[in-house]
Image (cartoon, grey):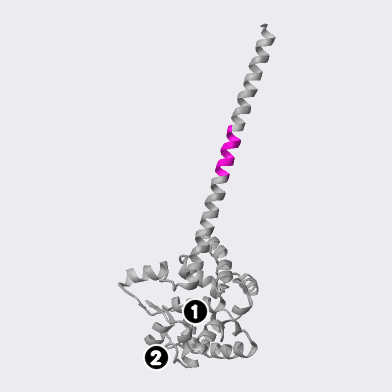
Amino acid sequence: MGRQGTKTARNRGAKAQRGNAIDRLARAIRRVTRLFVLAAAVFLLVLVAWVGLYRFVDPPGGLYMWQEHRRQGGISREWVPMERIAPVMARSAVAAEDANFCRHWGFDVNAIRAALDAGGQRGASTITQQVVKNVFLWHGRSWPRKALEALMTPMVEIIWSKQRILEVYLNVAEFDTGVFGVQAGARHYFQRDADTISARQAALLAAVLPAPQSRSAARPSDFVSRRARSIEDGAATIARDGRAACFGG
């Protein structure tokens, strides 16, 4: 074989080697892609199963509740079903935290727009989003938590009923430092059970929800008193206009 033939054979060999390398790389990329898709599918199935479980099983709490339990050496909490929560308490919580609860699918677009217009100075989280954060995730503003919240909120809306969402919310919300759930809150502040509180007491409990560690329902500041009056009016309004129908309020 002459020099030209040898050079041609070498070129063919180099091309074959490059082709084999490209094929190996393509196969590796396909394997990694398949593994990634499989891992994502398994992760999604785990989340769906977890959310589905809590449709029927009362959540034991959440990471924040567990952290507070360890920090304080104990917390006050007693789960009560929706039937043992005064309807006015459910309406008050919705009026205070998510007036369009019955009309959205987990995200209140109008509230989000208003929050953006206000430069992020006001919150836009719905009750469903708060349930996802308190039961399944952790507190904070990290992007991973926000991404998981955005993924799981529609799941909860699809798998749970609105009444179940509100029931869980009222049983995991913090009403004072280490006081979790409306039953513990009603006893802590008013020495009454959650199904016997008055409209005013329900409004006061709802008024402390955004900042339970700095507000008191038993010794309300002027701000909390004004907010409670507004919540009481709002609870009556959503009862009249049908915005409480989805949870039997």
Quarter assignment of residue 129? bottom right
Position of the C terminus by quadrant:
bottom right
Q: Which mark, residue 167?
A: 1
On the image, the x and y values in percent for residue 57 come to 45, 72
On the image, the x and y values in percent for residue 51 come to 50, 67
Quarter assignment of residue 98? bottom right
Between 98 and 35, the one lying in front of the other is: 35
Residue 43 is at least partly visible in this image: yes
Q: Is residue 149 above or below residue 246?
A: above
Say which residue appears at 52% left-offset and 77% top-offset.
Answer: 164
List the residue tagged with mark 2: 192
Q: Disc 1 marks which amino acid? A: Glu
Look at the numbered disc 2 and give the secondary structure of its residue. Answer: loop
Say which residue appears at 56% left-offset and 66% top-offset.
Answer: 155
Look at the numbered disc 1 and give the secondary structure of its residue. Answer: helix
**What segment is highlighted magenta in the picture?**
24-33
Q: In this view, does 38 lie above or below 78?
A: above
Q: Which mark, residue 176?
A: none
